[in-house]
Amino acid sequence: MKFLPKFRALLAPAVVMLLLGANPVSAALLTYTEPMTGFTYNSDTVSAAFNSALGSPYTYISFSAASSNDGTSYSPLVTFSTKVGTFGGSDTGNVNFSNEIGPFGSWDGILNIDFNGAYVSAVGFGLVEFDTAVEEIRVYDDSNALLGTFNNQLLNDMFSLWGVSASAGERIGHIELDGNFFAIQDIAFSSTVNSVPEPTSVALLGLGLVVLAFSRRNTNS
């Protein structure tokens, strides 16, 4: 049984990796705001800081020519829908449109922005009349865990950029804008296909390699 101490020595680092991998990365979101003048459709460039966080390449969608209530029609990368929120609304896949998009019906409720499983690290939009302290922006990761709740720091500004970026590897899965009579005029986001392995998966792979190495040593001895 002389091989047991060696096996334990090899196994210990893998167990540590497994335990560390099971702990989620703490949320560290950075937010960006900037006044906008009317329907300028430039939320991706109006703030140098946000533009830097956005990186390149990124996806930009303008709603200046919005022509459909179907929230899935604007891009295969993102789905817009309406949900019941603090200020009313209804659960539907539809949105309002008029040089902008917003919650379906009376422009009240939640505009849900879902990135369809992509790895999103930064996103921003041109807000229209989302300018009171009681209206909320909620950011979720790709497992539907809440990363943070915010409001528009530029209160009483009818038009403004609001953006967020993940600074500690978070994956932004979807965003809820819960407000009263509001819309967004455009959206910009950076995303890639989520192919990064989970930390727990990496740890398990490491554990398997350690066991394989031990088996070979035991066979050779």
Image (cartoon, helix red, strand yellow):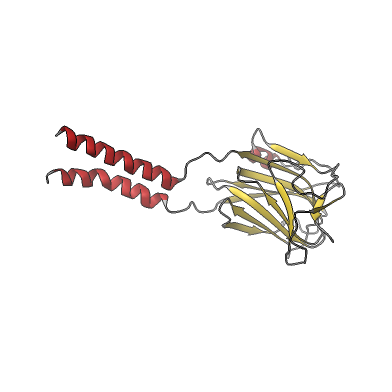
Residue 189 image position (x, y, % from top left): 68, 42
Residue name at image x 26 percent, y 46 percent: 11
199 or 68: which is nearer to us?
Answer: 68
Q: Is residue 112 left or right of residue 107?
A: left
Quarter of the image where one finds residue 45: top right
Residue 10 image position (x, y, % from top left): 25, 43
Quarter of the image where one finds residue 55: top right
Residue 173 image position (x, y, % from top left): 61, 49
Q: Is residue 23 left or right of residue 124?
A: left
121 or 221: which is nearer to us?
Answer: 221
Relative to 28, does residue 189 appear above or below in the rendering?
above
Label tally: 0
Quarter of the image where one finds residue 149: bottom right
Residue name at image x 17 percent, y 46 percent: 5
Residue 113 image position (x, y, % from top left): 70, 51
Relative to 133, does residue 164 appear above or below in the rendering?
above
36 or 197: which is nearer to us?
Answer: 197
Q: Residue furthest left?
A: 2
